[in-house]
Image (cartoon, rainbow, N blue to C red):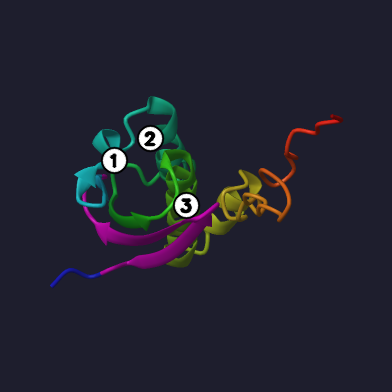
Amino acid sequence: MVRNLGIGTGRRKTSVARVYLREGTGKILVNGLEADKYFRFEELFNKVRGPLVVTANENKLDVVINVVGGGMNGQAGACRHGLARALAQFDPANHTALRTNGMLSRDPRMVERKKYGQRGARRRFQFSKR
């Protein structure tokens, strides 16, 4: 049986990520794929890996992530947030390093809702004088 050392839930925009830490060699699986295959851009992959680098756990733990909703950037942010929370739960000594790098705080920015009588959230329909 596989034993989870830490569990964290991360959120960003409309994405939600469930993160599980396990003993291993540093492999990161996102929705059944390797993280570098799932997040094709190096920038997004490094964003996800960030909490492991900050806490020096790159080659000590395996990470299994299930992420749903949103786009690639939102999903990467959700994975990062969930991984940081799981690492803080796994070892409370990690909390200060993660907090100082801003990885434990949820990014509150969301898409503004569309208003009635308008084309978008703020964009108006074209005005016609005649």
From the image, tell me which residue sits under label 3. Answer: 78
Above or below for 91 versus 97 = below
* Gap in angstroms between the C-alphas marked 3 and 1: 13 Å
Residue drawn at x 66%, y 52% as measured from the top left? 114
Mark 2 Cα-neighbour bin, 10 Å: few <14, some 14–19, many ≥20: some
The residue type indicated by label 3 comes to: Ala
**For the view shown, which residue lies furthest in the right direction?**
129
- Left or right: residue 26 compared with residue 85: left
Q: Residue furthest left?
A: 1
Figure disc tally? 3
Mark 2–mark 1 distance (CA, rounded to whole Å):
7 Å
Q: Could you tell me the amino acid type at mark 2?
A: Phe
Q: Quadrant of the N terminus?
A: bottom left
The residue sitting at 43% across, 47% down in the picture is 75
Q: Is residue 10 magenta?
A: yes
Question: Residue at label 2?
Answer: 45
Dividing the picture into quarters, in which one does residue 124 lie?
Answer: top right
Residue 11 pos. (x, y %)? 51, 57
Q: Disc 1 marks which residue?
A: 35
* Badge 3 or badge 2: first in the primary sequence: 2
Seen from this angle, which residue lies furthest bottom? 1
Q: Position of residue 85 (x, y in %)?
A: 49, 60
- What number is the disc on residue 128? none
Which residues fall within the magenta stretch? Answer: 4-26
Label located before the other in sequence (2 or 1) = 1
